[in-house]
Image (cartoon, grey):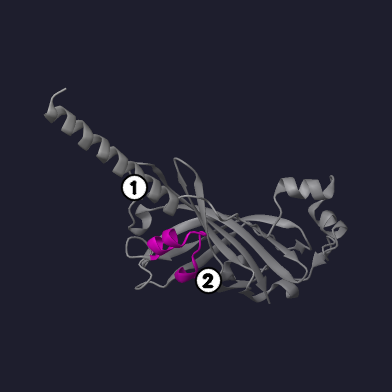
Amino acid sequence: MTKKTRTWLIAALAAVIVIGIGTYAWMKNYMGNNVEIESVLPTQAEANTASGGESTAEAAETNGSDASGAAVAADDLNGTWNIADASKVYFSVTTSQETVNFVDDQVSGTWDVNVNEASQMKGSGAIEIDAVDSGNAKRDEHIKSDDYFQMGQYPQATFTAESFDGLPTEWKEGEVYDFKLDGTLTVKGIEKPVTFEAKASYQGGQLLLSGTTTVTFEDFGMENPHSVVLSTENDINVQLELTLDK
């Protein structure tokens, strides 16, 4: 082996070590899912386990809640409902290694309900970008930066509801109703029409709303954060988990 070849091999080995250390540091700083999504409504499996074959309302009654399956008066439903402190909005990004969840618990907004005339319903909500949390400070700082959310210029992301398709005119305590929630999601001042596949329920004097939709990085002028060490799917899953008080 010549001196020149030996020098080249040593340089190449050093480069591999440096790249390996850099990759490890990057993965340590930016990977790892630390947030579990908590739904305000039970999944079907949870409902079946809790009920042992009973209806959702019967299961809720068995578990000690106020849900009894009784009809809910229109006057109890109609009016303005405010998003309560327990509400959260999640979004999730899937890489070649894992799915990482982010949560925002600084959620505000209203839902004006009119069960007799769905076309009269309206709603709006906002999250504070500064409250976005994945349990990893370096990662959170990065996504709030000008590379992604541009928090300094756009401190909120908002949603304006335009239609509520599929909600019944008559509700029962504890029953869960599927519907489609159409509206406009605005991030970084960029508007995107979206449809949430949603569920709603009236339980114990509160409205519970859960919904999911999918957007992409490109929808809001953001680049997919793929790198030489991992790939990232273009889809971003957005999930509403809202509790509302009248």
Callout 2 environment at 10 Å: few (<14), some (14 to 19), or many (20+)?
some
Residue annotated with mark 2: 124
Q: Which mark is residue 184?
A: none
- Depicted 60 relative to depicted 19: above or below: below
The amino acid on which the numbered mark 2 sits, given as a three-letter code, is Ser
Q: Which residue is drawn at 42% across and 48% down?
A: 27
In the image, 72: left or right of 141? right
In the image shown, does 196 or 166 lie closer to the viewer? 196
- Depicted 107 relative to depicted 38: above or below: below
Q: Looking at the image, tell me whether mark 1 or mark 2 is earlier in sequence order.
A: 1
- 81 in the magenta segment: no
If the image is split into quadrants, where does the C terminus sit? bottom right
The location of residue 106, given as percent across then percent down, is 54, 71
The amino acid on which the numbered mark 1 sits, given as a three-letter code, is Gly
Q: Residue at x 68, y 64 (%)?
A: 208
Point out the residue furthest to the top here. Answer: 1
The alpha-carbon separation of the residues under discs 1 and 2 comes to 43 Å
The location of residue 79, given as percent across then percent down, is 66, 77
In the image, 131: left or right of 113? left
Q: Which residue is drawn at 64% across and 62% down?
A: 209
Give the SS element for disc 2. Answer: strand
The location of residue 142, given as percent across then percent down, is 38, 61
In the image shown, does 82 or 167 lie closer to the viewer? 82
Give the SS element for disc 1. Answer: helix
Of badges 1 and 2, the one in the foreground is 1
Callout 1 environment at 10 Å: few (<14), some (14 to 19), or many (20+)?
few
Q: Quadrant of residue 188?
A: bottom left
Residue annotated with mark 1: 22
If the image is split into quadrants, where does the N terminus sit? top left
Q: Give the range drawn in magenta.
A: 124-144
The location of residue 41, given as percent across then percent down, is 69, 57
In the image shown, does 47 or 18 lie closer to the viewer? 18
